Image (cartoon, rainbow, N blue to C red):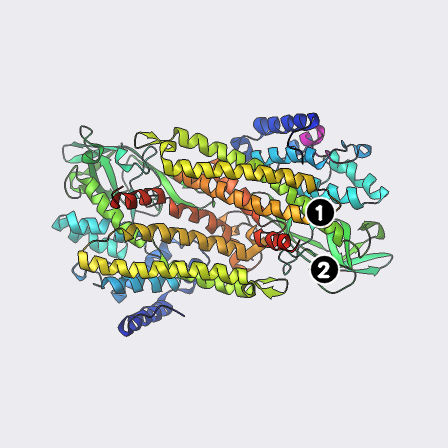
Amino acid sequence: MELQYPAHVRAFADEVRAFTRGNLPAETRERVIRNLRVTRDQQIDWQRKLCERGWACPAWPKEYGGPGFTPLQRHVFDNVTQEEGAPAAIPFGESMIAPVIMAAGSAEQKAYYLPKIRTMEYFFCQGFSEPGSGSDLASLRTSAKLEGDEWVINGQKMWTSMAHHANMIFMLVRTDSSGKPQEGITMLVFSLDRPGITIRPIITMDEGHHTNEVFFDNVRVPKSALIGEANKGWNYAKLLLGHERTTIARIGQSRRQLRILKDYAASELEDGAPLIAQQRWRDRIAAVEIELMALEVTALRSIAIQEEKGAPGVEANLLKVKGSEIQQKMTELLMDAAGPYAIPFDEEHGFGQTNQSIGPDLAASLAPNYLSTRVVTIYGGSNEIQRNIVAKTLGL
Amino acid sequence: MEFKLTETQSLLQETALRLMREKYSFEQRKQILGSAKGWSQALWKEYAELGLLGVEIDEEFGGSSGSFGDLAVVLEAFGRGLAVEPFLSTVVIGAGLISSAGSADQKKAYLSKISEGKMTVAFALGEPGSRFAPHRISTSAKAANGGFVLNGAKAVVIGGNDADMLIAAARIAGAETAREGLSLFLIDAKTKGVDIRAYRNTDERGAAEITFEQVHAPAGALLGPPGGAADLIDAALDRANAALVCETTGAIDAVNDLTLDYIKTRVQFGRPIGKFQALQHRMADMAMTAQLARSMMALAIDYANSTDAAARAWAISAAKVQIIQSAQIAGRGAIQLHGGIGMTLEYAAGHYLRRMTAMEKMFGDYDWHLTRFSRA
């Protein structure tokens, strides 16, 4: 049984599904299904296919080269492509900096950046967090000083995911320390191929290289790197993080994991009977499926509220909190289903000598995936911060 | 139940903790993990010299004839230090099985070697289709030439990546799931027909997929009564689980210490993040669950070597269920409270979570123990 969408929405979903099945390379799909990171080339290849179809950057309006989807179409598009094993879009370009450029960029910036973001010719990363500025982002200290026609940047960014794949960065820098911390922050956009930038990998506990620290030593970027007005960067950052939170729920991805979990529970035997034959397993899977349904309907309500009021409400925070918790729950249940084969660690992450997986095909990547998914309740504003925001909206 | 350490235990604890402090810092451990074996033979020798490998082994064979409670303080220290040497497989399971079921000749041949650090052992029990069922064994042992010939496949053999000796469970009679008809065999890992596919585990210790193809075992390789090994298997698994409870109790304390220290010193919004109530409550839950873990460790020690199999199963399963819950609260909580830094490989918190994650699925998971408890 599934949620019933109106006929025209279902028809659209079928169209997206058919396109994805017809155009997504099998190898890319296989990696996504197995929770392995896709390569830079695979990511860009899929983006180009979406460009050709006119579906790249599904949240963008037509005037900037987007498909001009309604919010509901966009929701369906994201979820169907994720369910089918397409790589999720890298949010930094199309979902984070692009909306800021659309809202605050100059005409030249829009004309220059947006087409390149759309094709991923410009692969963006995000320079926000710093060693001393995580949840308390406004305390950031990386500085930029205007010298003639150039900004000179000094400092360090952390958790710069994808910086090793990116050729562009948008970042927050301190341009004024005299007033409130939020008031002296500026947003800059520039390419990474310039002297003084050093990117160092941060290896995470799943032994993967997903993120980096980036050092800036007298890095000179043109004055035109400024987005909007100087010292107004905090406002743009808030706009951008609001967009991040609505895309972070990853409902389609969780639906895909749910299907994998059900298949797993149907094939993994305990005492000669499949796990799914146990009431305990049926209850567990049903409970998480219901949570996911509630999240999906909430996403639909959020869309309706956005259409009516022009901005997401408190439910955007809820989508992030519950969406991330469900993602973690899925990885936990998959580990439970794998049983003893959750113990070995995937060879792709550094230590096997053979290509054949240990135990069932899927099992090998479960532990790294479980470990790396611990981050989803931390990034994009930790769930503690989200709950603080919800509490604030309640007047507490 | 004993809540106070004996004098012997205090000394053992001090020894083991000092070793961890001096020889198992994060950086030293990293070196060890990066070495060819992935564990330290030098430290293994040192454990032997300090008597840590022979805690329970009879004095006659170079041990101290100690109790499981003596072993427990060492295990707890190793959990705290995230030691990766094959102590669980060799000392807890291997020496345990040989001590309880070995013939005079077998004890003489192997126990001294284990206590001297000259032999590692792995228990080849589980099979690809057995999940956690300890008696669902289709590896066969057929009588031939005055000995036996073994055929079959073993899955996720903890320590099997680097064991000198395997204790293999095989069926000489009976249906696939029968308690009757099971035997244990001491098989040199280099025996012809033994194929070992070694790999590393999430907890950075090792395991292996092992196949036996026409492996010849002489009559003297039989460990314990032929066809009557089910009780031995159950006892070995209960000891292994009790050991995991002790290790994990140490790991929980260590990761809690680390987290508490971090939230007291990490400043955001102008104050240590530990001043925020949301984090305080989570930390308080982690501290409380560590107490429950410690309590169940006392219970597990009390029953680990009990000859009352039903009571032992009941108590050990209860302890395992609680330790899994406690480990999840502490391990996952530690990462969350640390934030990004907790996610990195260069920081210890993630390594504790990895240890705990593998522990959950060793020798029976949450469900398996919950079911066994409820049937007791």
What residue is drawn where x is 81% and y is 57%?
A: B148
User: Image check: A23 left or right of B13?
Assistant: left
Q: Which portion, as a residue range, is magenta? A: B46-56
* Front residue (pair B165, A217): B165
Q: Secondary structure at mark 2?
A: loop
Percent of width and height locating residue A328: 43, 51
* Quadrant location of the N terminus of chain A in the rendered image: bottom left
Q: For this view, does A85 lie left or right of residue B130?
A: left
Name the side, left or right, on which A253 lies relative to B325: left
Image: A211 above or below A18: above
- Left or right: B151 as drawn, with respect to A36: right
Q: Nearer the viewer, mark 1 or mark 2?
A: 1
> Marks 1 and 2: CB-CB under 8 Å?
no
Q: Residue at x 42, y 41 (%)?
A: B336
Residue on which the image places disc 1: B236
The residue at 71%/28% (across/down) is: B49
Pick whichever, B328 or B210, lies toward us. Answer: B328
How far apart are the two marked residues, 1 and 2, measured between alpha carbons? 19 Å
Image quarter of the C terminus of chain A: top left
Q: Position of residue A31 (x, y in %)?
A: 44, 58
Residue B272 higher or lower than B361, as above or below: above
Density class for disc 2 (Cα within 10 Å; few <14, some 14-19, many ≥20) is many
Quadrant position of residue A234:
top left
Residue A33: x, y in percent?
Answer: 44, 60
Please report whichever mark, 1 or 2, sits nearer to the chain's N-terminal start.
Answer: 2
Chain where mark 2 sits: B
Q: Which mark is residue B139?
A: 2
